[in-house]
């Protein structure tokens, strides 16, 4: 496995298995994306509510990398879902990014109106503005409701997954329905880095605990999007293709689950 490894989505799009997340990257977004491109990343994950799509677009243009080599994800925010502004919101994101299309467009949270928003996204995909459509923060119940009312299975469900937060019910449902899983907060906002079982594995491979966690997720066939604005960590996070965890080590990691969220609960949020 190497850093160019991609997975095939249900819509045939090829998606790189590691991305740079840019949530809360602020004024450092552009440089972080450029550093990521230099390190070999070709997948950037942003969202309209992050307020940095323009900075991501600037980095894309400055990089000189051919558009066909890049995979860009952005997301439809809750207010636009509720107000039925799916098309307008996407066009605004495309303008800010300076792109003709995005590779993946996600419903950010399962707020009222997500079915209508998804149906509109299906049309936008047919029109070529989106290569793949998916969802974020959808649990099994949300997915069951969505699948009963739309025409295309989501390519991706991006949810919080890390050693202490493993929603196995949702993970199993996605795997059964060929919905690719993507992990946000893969390091548990740093809270998983000092778990002694992970540190022991990291010591064995002369890797950081962050690298072990990211490797564990990849070996569970989960796409990862670690966020950092620090060049050395951006480089470290992609250098996870020169070692492999054993089945026993994966099982140790699997048993660290506490269902402990670092972000909002998709069943109980108020934004």
Image (cartoon, rainbow, N blue to C red):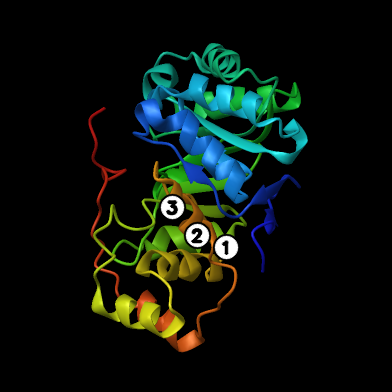
Image coordinates of residue 182 in percent, x first then y, are 50, 52
Q: Is residue 152 left or right of residue 255?
A: right
Check if mark 2's residue and mark 1's residue have beta carbons within 8 Å. yes
| Farthest residue, direction bottom | 248
| Res 259 visible | yes
| Res 144 visible | no
What residue sits right under mark 3 in the picture? Answer: 232
Q: Is residue 58 left or right of residue 207?
A: right
Image coordinates of residue 100 in percent, x first then y, are 70, 19
Q: Is residue 86 above or below residue 173?
A: above
Q: Is residue 32 left or right of residue 256?
A: right
Image coordinates of residue 30 in percent, x first then y, are 49, 29
- Residue at mark 2 to residue at mark 3: CA–CA distance: 36 Å
Quadrant of the rendered image containing residue 198: bottom left
Q: Secondary structure at mark 3?
A: helix
Q: Secondary structure at mark 1?
A: helix
- Residue at mark 1 to residue at mark 3: CA–CA distance: 37 Å
Q: Is residue 3 above or below residue 53?
A: below
Mark nearer the N terminus (1 vs 3): 1
- Residue at mark 2 to residue at mark 1: CA–CA distance: 5 Å
The residue positioned 40% from the left and 31% from the top of the image is: 28
* Front residue of this view, candidates 30 and 133: 30
Query: Pointer 2: residues within 10 angstroms few (<14), some, or many (20+)?
Result: some
What residue sits right under mark 2 in the picture? Answer: 173
What residue sits right under mark 1 in the picture? Answer: 176
Image coordinates of residue 246 in percent, x first then y, are 51, 85
Q: Quadrant of the C terminus?
A: top left
């Amino acid at each position: 496995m190497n850093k160019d490894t991609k997975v095939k989505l249900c819509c045939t799009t090829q998606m790189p298995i590691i991305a740079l997340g840019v949530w809360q990257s602020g004024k450092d977004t552009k440089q972080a994306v450029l550093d990521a491109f230099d390190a070999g990343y070709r997948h950037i994950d942003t969202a309209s509510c992050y307020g940095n799509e323009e900075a991501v677009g600037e980095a894309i243009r400055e990089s000189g990398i051919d558009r066909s080599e890049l995979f860009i994800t952005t997301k439809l925010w809750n207010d636009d879902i509720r107000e039925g502004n799916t098309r307008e919101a996407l066009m605004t994101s495309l303008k800010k990014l300076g792109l003709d299309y995005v590779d993946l467009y996600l419903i950010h949270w399962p707020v009222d109106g997500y079915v209508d928003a998804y149906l509109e996204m299906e049309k936008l995909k047919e029109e070529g503005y989106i290569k793949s459509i998916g969802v974020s923060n959808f649990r099994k119940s949300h997915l069951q409701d969505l699948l009963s009312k739309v025409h295309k299975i989501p390519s991706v469900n991006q949810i919080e997954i890390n050693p202490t937060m493993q929603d196995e019910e949702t993970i199993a449902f996605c795997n059964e329905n060929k919905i690719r899983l993507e992990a946000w907060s893969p390091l548990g906002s740093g809270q998983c880095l000092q778990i002694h079982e992970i540190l022991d594995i990291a010591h064995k491979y002369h890797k950081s605990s962050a690298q072990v966690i990211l490797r564990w997720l990849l070996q569970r066939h989960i796409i990862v999007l670690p966020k950092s604005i620090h060049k050395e960590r951006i480089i470290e996070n992609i250098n996870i293709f020169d070692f492999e965890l054993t089945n026993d080590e994966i099982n140790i990691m699997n048993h660290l689950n506490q269902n402990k969220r670092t972000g909002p609960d998709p069943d109980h949020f108020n934004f």
